[in-house]
Image: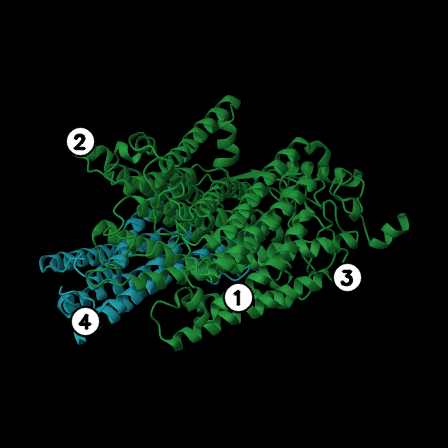
Chain colours: A green, B cyan
Amino acid sequence: MLTETHGVAHVLLGNLTWAALPFVRAWRDPNVSEIIGTGAGAVVILGAIAMFALVTWLGKWRYLWTEWFTSLDHKKIGIMYVVLAGVMLARALVEAVLIRTQQAVAINAPGYVEPGHFAQLFTTHGSIMVFFMAMPFLTGLINYVVPLQIGARDMAFPYMNSVGFWLTAAGAALMMVSLAVGEFSTGGWSGYPPYTELAFSGGVGPDYWIWAISLSSLGSMTVGINVACTIFKMRAPGMNFMRLPLFCWTSLCTSILMIFAMPPLTAVTLLLAGDRYLGMHFFTDDGGGNMMNYVNMFWLFGHPEVYILILPAFGVYSEVISAFSSKELYGYTSLVLATMAIAVLSFTVWLHHFFTMGQGADVNAVFGIATMTIGIPTGVKIYDWIFTMFRGEVRFTPSMLFSIAFLVTFTLGGFTGIILATPPLDYAVHDSLFLVAHFHNMLIPGTLYGMVAGYMFWFPKAFGFRLNERWGRIAVACWVPGFFLAFFPLYLLGLAGMARRTQAVFDPAFRPWLYAALLGALLMISGLVTLFVQLYVSIRDRAANRVPVGDPWDARGLEWSVAAPPPEWNFATIPHVGDRDAFYWRKRNKGAYRAADHYRDIVLPKNSACGVVLGVASGLCCFGLIWHIWWMALLFGLLAVATIIVRPFMRDVTRVIPAVEVEAVDRAWLAQAHAARPVPREEEQSSLNQGLAEGFPELVAKRA
Amino acid sequence: MTPDPVAPALRHAGLNLRHASREEAEQVESDVFGFWVFLMSDAVVFATLFALFGTSLEATAGAPDLRAVVKLGPAFIETMLLLTSSFTFGMASIEFSRVHRLTRRHQRLAVRWLLVTWVLGTAFLGMEVNDFVTMAHNGATADRSFFLSAFTVLVGTHGLHVLTGVIWLPLMLLQLAGLGLDRPLKVNLIRLSLFWHFLDIVWIAIFSVVYLQGALR
């Protein structure tokens, strides 16, 4: 694939040649596979140009730079994370449809993408969905919600928050660039050597994978430290651990998992880089290398990662189900214990990802039993959520519908997990579509539904208007049946022996099931389109759906006790917490929406360009490393180091919001709250909802 | 002066922060705690590298093995250098905590202790580089076997950390000269001292697991 360059060109451009561009490849060898690659590259380039032109035309560069890119406000960084996740979700879902289409048409036929291209598709699909869709999405929600829920003004380390985001964004940018310049890895999202070593994958593909993942992994480590520190140290007075909202608990456990699980990933990707760049022998076939070390280290990260992805969604479900069942969460203590138990157990099961790779039966048995043990705390949670709904006043908002779909779908996926946790059964179905069906069955309801539910739940808080519920329900109607149609046939195909990651299929009996799966994939991508339509419709009709008072769902946590969108400083005065579901009880005891006795100056972090510079420099440094453009790697590597060095010299990093301004904003919002008409629960999905919930259900009855 | 009774006890901070206000104390507490968490995360990196080293001992592929690459003499001197540098950093921290607005004496002493620490750290690095150059002369380079890769990366990662400290320390002195001993600098000095002592602990593990094992094999 690569041709050697020489002389000046080599010094300037490293291994970068014309053949790196898919357009040139398609020109030289026009076939459907290359043309699809070209199309994808063109979408990236035209998309970037169009975005650039649009922002310039609207004259919004200054606005983006000062209000968003350089902001250290946890709310804005959280929103940027979610936007990044949305963009990457769109790309990876298109790739999923291409994968399904290829398998559906390549039955005793070549299909339309070549094996190498197909391998890139499943590699990028997996890598993006895990590292650049799910991780940014959950990080974004945590970033936005946790400080508001614990009564804090920001995260513990606002600057590191920005750095973490821009490192992740740089990794995502490398993923996008790989479409237009060069190629991506064909080694799957887990990148197992020795296949990803130079001896078998000589191109730049694995290098793109290594550096994109390393950036994301470093970013996630900063997120872990930041979130854990925020929850440990920044809680409002009275907010002791057993009064934390459950989303904070799951965020805390996720961040602890990040702190312990990200280092093995960073280490293992950099060691693989050592093999590829410096000729080391960690995982090579020769020189005594041992790929099992990679596999163990990767899954030492990889299994906790599963819970990093799932726990925040569990937190969202706890919040959503409690709010929309109009009930206190059932079994709060058991949910906390179950969350902690899952977090601890997640470090004891990594070996079940490779039962068939040479351990003895005893070792497999231990890890199989440990794996099944995780089913117990998870089962506890499922019952807790069911009992929360029991005899509650359940409102079927789109968030709630996603939560209910999760309960059913996730439980079914859990059963197939028990099958896979049994080593003898795993021997029969490992590396088949059964496995693919299983982990999608866990991660789509267990992460994606949760993230979407959280996005719909907290959107009115972040932007001050509700998302259109009708389009939300249409999205549920696409995603949920789409999921069943796309993945349940894969269980059958896996049991029938169809291997995963296969570019061509030779058994015509598989055809109907593959068609069903393709239909399901199309339904799911329609689900994504409806989410975008919902966003568009909601922005268009925002005037009618404003909820400025900030509590549209008669919900319970402190995040609902402030305006929507919240002021930059979150809380005019730091609240004192006397109970679990603090805001709910304050509302009921007529203690909410009161002005403070006196207001004080608030110190907030100033904007900083250092995070952006660090992210861009790291991304360009990695691009230089990928293409062996050493001057570029060195230059931008030094720029990154210089940024890290210069920032601590800056002393003028905070600004003060005067008390009068805080008071003015707070009193204006309180006036709005007192003027607003309370909305009964059954009307909250209508324009009557101004974000002020009506009192007790008895009062509702009296009014009727 | 007695500490503010409502302020949380500064459990980690030492650098003359005893009389901090409540907000300041909370902020410092949180800032330093974050660094402890980072060190914990960093310790996991070293743990994985130790595990790799453990599995690599027999994988020498005909290249020099542990017994051949380990020189106990220089390693012992390096250990002494690093342990002494930890002691001198501790002395610097004590002097910093006694800094008083009326006299510059303690600050001057603290700076001197830090300079000694820097010299010791740099000497350690110099000896370590010399070790690797000697190894290379004897044909023991990282690209020859899994064992040599694991050895180089384990010892080298620690070395890179020490290099970070050796770059970090003069930057702190520069801030001290230019900006004075303000709160952000105090916090960063606490972090640097934690980092320095952490590297000492990691080195003790490296000395025991790598060098002593090599000498006893």
Q: Earlier in the sequence, mark 2 or mark 1?
A: 2
Give the alpha-carbon distance from disc 1 to disc 4, as whole Å: 40 Å
Q: Quadrant of residue A316?
A: bottom right
**Amino acid type, label 1:** Ile
Residue sitting at x 39%, y 78%? A362
Q: Which residue is mark 1?
A: A342
Q: Which residue is mark 3?
A: A391
* Foreground disc of the pair 1, 4: 1
Q: Mark 2: which secondary structure?
A: helix
Asked whether residue A246 is in view, the answer is no
**Amino acid type, label 3:** Arg
Q: A400 above or below A170? A: below
**Amino acid type, label 4:** Gly
Pointer 3 and pointer 4: residues touching (CB < 8 Å)? no
Q: Residues within 10 Å of mark 4 (few under 14, many from 20)?
A: some
Q: Mark 3: which secondary structure?
A: loop
Marks 1 & 4 on one chain: no
Provide residue B61's location: percent of width, then percent of height. Answer: 16, 65
Disc sitting over residue B214 in the figure: 4
